Image: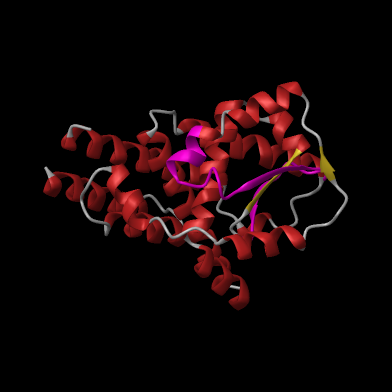
């Protein structure tokens, strides 16, 4: 069964190249292709980094502006509560501080591996299921934090796009393990991109993969993860 799963992944990688997918997408898929042929839960547990310590967390919080944090209303609190299964699964529920911030763009971001920053426009724009998926992507940044710092220092746009797709992959595996719908990730990304484009707040759009690449990548990883679940019986 493991051979079948790996062969399927190799075929997907070949299809990426044949169909004219971007190099970052092909490289990200090869990363997941090279992982041990086990179920998504085992893959994530193997990759999961140690979380930041209390001192690092305190330093991350200390550098944030004193103003700009918003108090969530009842509906927003209900959406934020839906993040708990994702955070608990990744052992980050007692690590990440969640802050709703007052910025005009739709944004969900991880600050210093310790603080989830969610803008009010994003919180109101996406559904609870889409927010779960977007936060699972941000947890992917925790997995690849050092690599993101290195690609940013080099100004390596292709490397940045590849890492964004790897974070999408972490999100997809997470959602499959939790029996949630990975398609919600693409939906949430699309809503944020359209909102920010209309706002004129998409100056860094070139640092991110094209939406169609992300959608196809998410579908490929979902199918691969589903195959692993079926072949391992989990």
Q: Using the image as rendered, state which of residue 226 and residue 128 is in the foreground.
A: 128
Q: Which quadrant of the figure has residue 206?
A: bottom right
Query: Is residue 89 covered in magenta?
Result: yes
Horizontal arrangement in the rendering, residue 53 relative to residue 101 (left or right): left
The structure residue drawn at horizontal position 36% and vertical position 43%, both measured from the top left corner, is: 221
Furthest-front residue in view?
54
- Name the spot of residue 195 as percent of width and height, x first: 74, 37
Rendered view: 215 above or below 45: above
Q: From the image, which quarter does the C terminus lie in?
A: top left
Scheme by which the image is coloured: secondary structure
Q: Which residue is drawn at the image coordinates 45% and 45% (left, top)?
A: 90
Residue 39 percent across, percent down from the top left: 25, 43
| Position of 81 relative to 87 (above/below) | above
Q: Which residues are magenta?
A: 85-112
Any part of residue 42 in sight: yes
Residue 24 sits inside the magenta stretch = no
**Residue 4: where, in percent of width, then height?**
14, 44
Instruction: Say whether residue 112 is left or right of residue 42.
Output: right
Residue nearest the observer in this picture, 63 or 118: 63
Q: Is residue 158 above or below residue 224?
A: below
Farthest right residue in view:
67
Residue at image point 55% right, 53% down: 209
Say above or below: 35 vs 181: below
Image coordinates of residue 219 in percent, x first then y, are: 40, 38
The answer, for residue 102, to whether it is visible in the render is: no
């Amino acid at each position: 069964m493991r051979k079948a799963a790996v062969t399927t992944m190799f075929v997907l990688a070949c299809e990426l190249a044949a169909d004219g997918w971007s190099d970052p997408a092909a490289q990200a898929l090869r990363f997941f292709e090279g992982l041990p042929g086990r179920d998504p839960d085992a893959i994530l547990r193997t990759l999961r980094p140690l979380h930041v310590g209390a001192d690092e967390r305190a330093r991350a919080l200390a550098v944030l502006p004193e103003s700009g944090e918003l108090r969530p209303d009842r509906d927003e609190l209900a959406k934020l509560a839906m993040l708990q299964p994702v955070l608990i699964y990744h052992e980050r529920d007692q690590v990440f501080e969640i802050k709703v911030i007052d910025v005009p763009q739709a944004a969900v971001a991880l600050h210093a591996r310790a603080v989830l920053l969610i803008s009010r426009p994003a919180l109101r724009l996406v559904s609870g299921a889409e927010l779960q998926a977007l936060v699972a992507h941000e947890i992917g940044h925790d997995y690849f934090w050092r690599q993101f710092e290195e690609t940013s220092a080099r100004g390596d746009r292709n490397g940045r796009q590849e890492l964004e797709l790897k974070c999408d992959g972490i999100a997809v595996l997470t959602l499959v393990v939790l029996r949630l719908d990975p398609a919600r990730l693409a939906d949430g990304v699309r809503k944020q991109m359209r909102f920010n484009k209309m706002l004129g707040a998409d100056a860094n759009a070139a640092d991110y993969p094209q939406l169609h690449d992300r959608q196809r990548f998410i579908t490929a990883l979902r199918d691969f993860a589903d195959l692993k679940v079926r072949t391992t019986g989990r």
